[in-house]
Amino acid sequence: MVITNPKYEEALLRYNKKIAAASVEDMVLNVGPQHPSTHGVLRLELITDGEIVKEVIPHIGYLHRCFEKHAESLTYQQTIPFTDRMDYLASMNNSHAFVMGVERMMGIDKDIPKRVEYIRVLVCELNRIASHLIAIGTYGIDIGAFTPFLWCFRDREHIMGMLEWASGSRMLYNYIWVGGLFYDLPVGFEERCRDFVEYFKPKMVELNQLLTDNQVFISRTANVGVLPLDVAINYGCSGPMLRASGLKWDLRRIDNYSAYPEIDFEIPIGQGLMGKVGDCWDRYKVRVDEIEQSLRIIEQCLDRLQKELKRTPDFDPRAKMPRKTIPKAQDYYVRCEGAKGELGFYFITDGKSEIPTRVKSRGPSFNNLSVLPELSKGVLIADLIAIVGSIDFVLGEVDR
Amino acid sequence: MSFDDIKNLLTEKLGDTVITGEETGGLQPALLINPDDITAVCLELRNNPKTYFDFLSSLSGVHYNDEANRYGVVYHLASIPYKTQLTLKISKAHPKESTELPEFKSITSVYRTADWHERETYDMLGIYFEGHPDLRRILLPDDWEGFPLRKDYQNAEFYKGIRID
């Protein structure tokens, strides 16, 4: 099939012309795809006038594997490992969202045992901390602070070790399954997790002293890349990015899914303590505060898991797994709060096979990154690096 | 506002021809909208103080692959003040052997989220959005041939003389 209409090529020609014209008067500068500050393989094409960035054109797709095409040829259970590879820093959250969607379509979401729900929330929150630790650590290194990076990775290693103990793999877990879990938590997990929480709390104080209240860090991030709330909403930003602009919007509270309605936690928002609301420092600070809230959630989960939901010898986390995962014909959009923001999956099923007709994934990083050209109009190149780092995207999810 | 209220509101404001049907069988009801009116419907739903659907969660292109070879776009809106969700659907039959792409109106002027999502839909399904400011391929290279998420897509064997395994 040959597509001939010239209007389909218009945008590409316009773009080529713009770059050609810009290289006469201004300078076209490529940041990436192998630049350490782009956190992966993102290429930013900057049109600059001296040190001032006039325009940013992001080029994505270097990690594209077409998750959606894979999902159209595999069963639901087989697709879960692929969701792990989207946001590879928070795999548990991805599979949790996907699994929740399938369970609701099957109508078995109310039958999931409480212990399974609490274990899911526990591992998701551990993973959220790990993801935020990377965000904070690498943000420090973007700005020039090397020590917090090493400290964050040291503490993240404990979480990796625990999740490896539970699931058998370090980053891509495939632990949450439709209707249950891969295995129950290993014996002694709760105690080790509690030790970790006790160990980790003072480390957060140290991290705050080292980075959050550091004057050099504040000077680089406060009042830089201010994202007003209306712009954030219109661009579909979500997660810490939206909350830093001052809106209490957390799907864990809005949708009240899984075990979250029974758990008490705060939703931190940006307050503009060091500059304006919605600047880079606020986005950083929201993540730090979220780690503390996640620790609270973990403690409450552990309380329940060690008392009334204690492990029993006959407990089978796979008991509710459906033999055949064939939801009736419908389409369903499930959303949940991933580590980076609203993570959504849209399913279309035909009611006959175990393979969905269409799966679309709405990655939070994809939408959060799309605001970058708007955020970085007229900033200095050095500030652009601070802005890119504060968005905290994972290219595996942007490109899918 | 309930689903029926939204339906009545749209009929009242924009006329009877706007809504062509509804799907209420599944867990989430969906409104089928006349493809030509989608921009006006989104603008009305976003700006009306009774609905305030100010957040576009997701925009998905679909190739239904049925007898009429329909192509469609599904919009998932969310309202932050009211904490509600709404699904809008548009679709159009498209002849299989046509050398043109199926065309829909762009809603970039209402939600900037749609910018990258529509580019992705264009890239993956070959749906052209009229009025989009910068409709280039986004995930695939600019010179890629074909649209991978179409059901009749044939895997490319070579890309610039390099065999694809």
Image (cartoon, rainbow, N blue to C red):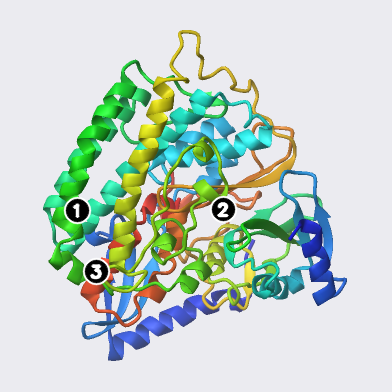
What is the chain letter for disc 1? A
Looking at the picture, how far across and down is residue B72, in whole percent?
70, 59
Q: Tell which tag, 2 or 1, sits nearer the viewer.
A: 1
Front tag of 3 and 1: 1
Q: Which residue is mark 1?
A: A208
Q: Secondary structure at mark 2?
A: loop
Is any atom of residue A291 visible in this view? yes
- Please say if B1 is above or below A110: below
Tell me where residue B64 appears, x and y as whole percent: 72, 51
Residue receiving disc 2: B148
Secondary structure beneath disc 3?
A: helix
Residue B121 placement (x, y as % from top left): 58, 61
Q: Decide which of B96, B160 is in the foreground and name it.
A: B96
Crowd tier of the residue under label 2, counting other residues whose Cα lies within 10 Å: few below 14, some 14–19, many 20 or above: many
Q: According to the image, label 3 marks what residue?
A: A221
Tag 2 and tag 1 share a subunit: no
| Left or right of residue A273: residue A205 | left
Residue depicted at 40% across the width and 48% down the height: A339
Single out the residue that lies furthest toward the top.
Answer: A313
- Residue at left 84%, top 63%? B20
- Find out whether the residues at labels 3 and 1 contact each other: C-beta distance under 8 Å: no
